[in-house]
Amino acid sequence: MSNEVRDLYREIVIEHSKRPRNFRKLESVPAAEGYNPLCGDRVTVYVDVTGEQLNDIAFEGSGCAVCVGSASMMTEILKGKSREEAAQIFDSFRALVTSGAQVSCPPALGDLVAFAGVRAFPSRIKCALLPWETLWRVISPPHPDPLPSTSSGQALGGEGTHFAPSPSGPSTPSRLRS
Amino acid sequence: MGRVHTAISAAAPAFDVQSMRADFPILRQTVYGKPLVYLDNAATAQKPRAVIEAMARFYAEDYANVHRSVHALSERATQTYEEARGKVRRFLNARDDREIIFVRSTTEAINLVAHSYGRTRLGPGDEIVLSVMEHHSNIVPWQLVCQDRGAVLRVVPITDDGELLMEEYARLLSSRTKLVAMAHVSNALGTINPLAPIIAMAHARQIPVLIDGAQAVPHLPVDVQALNCDFYAFSGHKLYGPSGIGVLYGKADLLEAMPPYQSGGEMISSVSFERTTYDRLPYKFEAGTPHIAGAVGLGAALDYVGALGMRAIAAHDRKLLAYATNQLSRVPRVRLIGTAKEKVGVVSFVVAGVHPHDVATVLDREGIAIRAGHHCAQPLMQRFAISGTARASLALYNTREDIDALVAGLGEVLEVFA
């Protein structure tokens, strides 16, 4: 087995993907759905936010180990943080998975450094980022959509789409990829 | 090409996979330091040197626009292009070259029928019958035309093995049914649908039938006259030909009665601002400069598989499918999706506790190319209550060693996701 594969699927990532933390729905809080039509990763991220403070974060959905592991560890590290702190961690995480940059200054990414191996797999970077971009749609102004939503809001990076049931016939995703 | 011809004529039924592999330059490479094992043939197949060289030669020696000019190159290009049409006619055993329309892809072929036939023949309350195992390209064009015309899609369900429920199909056919659109072979399951009764039952009610043959033509001999289908669509690129060229076969009387799909140059007989008359078949449906070299490449691909013989290719496919099914069934935590009795070499599976994309990523680093995901068949994935599958799909150049590599790779998957 290649070292790159071992680096992608670090034990802690797989452990989180098998037993995701904060894997539940939060009632009556803003939420957004992120969907990657290419691979079918789908997460709904719920954020209980008061002012600048992210009190609680949870998610539901299904996806690959990289996506679910990333979502699980994201909820752990961001819970209790301010928007500002969350933004810094997201920036660091994005830099880590896209370029492998180990950001020298705080905030520390903690266990999230396990995702450094993703950069060797360009097609999987979006899997790691999907939960974060979805969360970002919830907490970034101006208008986070509470679910259920009828809008087809785009995730950052344009990966997100909502299913829009067609008026007749079976429901079909608004965007289909072959 | 010459070597293949000789090999076939000298030692009749020999199907020498190793010598065929040598015909496909791309297979001779390593990926991440491992020999390439290409098992993503249902997405697209690799090209033999005969196809690559035929296209290069055409561009180097004979290229010009077709059906337009009197000069020598244009005449040669036109002749070569029309010879390719003849090869397609023989490949499908169609009655007439006029019934062979060059398009970009299976998708475009289906869109052609959906627009030209669907929009003129469908009215409110009319129905189109298709199956739950269709590729999106045989769903969405019909969905759009139904929305436009107030018509309705009716969907034939399948068994847990991935076989069409024929009694349900019979029940769905009615006086409201205006068309049946059905895959010959399921791209995600490998199921071969029983076209003879499907078509006969529709015809008993004067309902025309379109067959999506994209996944069938690489694996099976096809005879559109024996099938008696009304339309048959396929792409060149899954059949060892280039991408960007596909075929719509249609019965001449149906095509004659249909209005053009796209319009512009090439497809007209005369144009004035008051009135345009359309060219005869098949040109009525070939607006604009076609993918001329693509048709030439497809012709070369048909020569290639023709020299091997589709029956021999099908026999190789059956044997390798049986081996793959047997070997994969023994891998712990692996469950096959699509276990119909009649199948081609498409093996979809899920690994318990491992997302298909993670399966594909680990295999990729072992040099093994498969497809993971919903395979453009989301309704089918919903039917099996899964988000997607991993899919290994076979071609004439695949070997038992390729399957063994896949099984070994799955061992790595199980180790990573212990």
Image: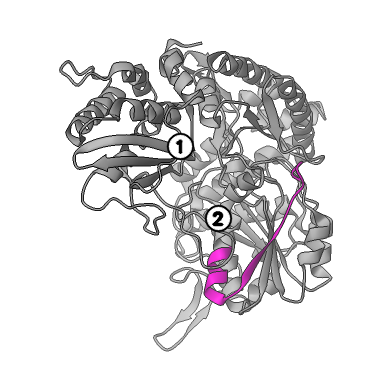
Left of A93 or right of it: where is B83? right
Q: Which amino acid is tagged 2?
A: Thr
Quick check: B80 above or below B161?
A: below
Q: Is residue B148 magenta?
A: yes
Q: Which amino acid is tagged 1?
A: Arg
Quick check: B142 above or below A74?
A: below
Q: Position of residue B260 (x, y in %)?
A: 54, 73
Pick whichever, A9 or B218, lies toward us: A9
- Indicate the secondary structure of the residue bearing disc 1: loop
Pick whichever, B273 or A161, lies toward us: A161
Q: Disc 1 marks which residue? A: A24
Question: How dense is the environment of label 2, judged by Cα within 10 Å: few (below 14), some, or many (20 and up)?
Answer: many
Q: Disc 2 marks which residue? A: B107
Q: Position of residue B246 (x, y in %)?
A: 57, 53
Measuring 52% from the left and 48% from the top, which residue is drawn there? B294
Question: How dense is the environment of label 1, judged by Cα within 10 Å: few (below 14), some, or many (20 and up)?
Answer: some
Name the quadrant of the N terminus of chain B: top right
Measuring 32% from the left and 35% from the top, which residue is drawn there? A56
